[in-house]
Image (tube, rainbow, N blue to C red):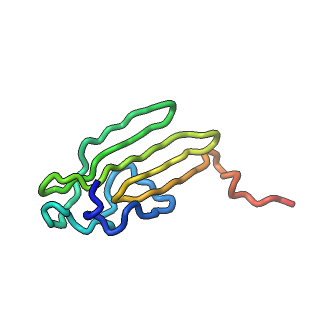
Amino acid sequence: MCTSCVQKEYPDRGNTCLENGSYLINYVGCAKCHQRDFVLISNKATEEEDGEEIVTYDHVCKNCDHIIARHEYTFSVVDDYQEYTMLCLLCGKAEDSISVLPDDPRQTAPLF
């Protein structure tokens, strides 16, 4: 993808995983047409493989169709947790894990 279109390659986004959209704060402008305009999403595909949902799409310049970055988002359920990951040159890298139980066992303090 295009490293000249972004401020920082694969910025650390903590636990913010985007299933759709663009992280425009990291976008400096299109290296091909030199415009800083909207970023479109194209070639969006969703597939399911071994219980894991994988969403992929391209971030594309609105003016010249230059491909800025390829976005990949995954979702799965492992044991009692929903697992999310994101990897994208523009949007960054992130992971999150959320308990499917009402009270997350990792967050409870021991009684004794």
Using the image, determine if residue 43 lies above or below residue 111.
above
Q: Position of residue 58 (x, y in %)?
A: 28, 48
Residue at 48% x, 56% y: name it. 94
Asked whether the viewer can see residue 108, the reply is yes
Looking at the image, which is closer to me, 49 or 20? Answer: 49
Residue at 46% x, 63% y: name it. 12
Q: Position of residue 19 (x, y in %)?
A: 39, 49
Q: Position of residue 46 (x, y in %)?
A: 36, 37
Q: In which quarter of the view is residue 81 placed?
A: top right
Q: Residue furthest right?
A: 112
Asked whether the viewer can see residue 25, the reply is no
In the shown orientation, is residue 100 left or right of residue 68? right
In the shown orientation, is residue 55 left or right of residue 100? left
Looking at the image, which is closer to me, 110 or 42? Answer: 42
Q: In which quarter of the view is residue 78 placed?
A: top right
Residue at 66% x, 52% y: name it. 104
Q: Residue furthest top?
A: 50
Q: Position of residue 17 (x, y in %)?
A: 44, 54
In the shown orientation, is residue 35 left or right of residue 94? left
Looking at the image, which is closer to me, 54 or 108? Answer: 54
Quarter of the picture containing the C terminus is bottom right
Using the image, determine if residue 84 lies above or below residue 36.
above
Residue at 25% x, 63% y: name it. 5
Number of dots carrying numbers: 0
In the shown orientation, is residue 53 left or right of residue 62? right
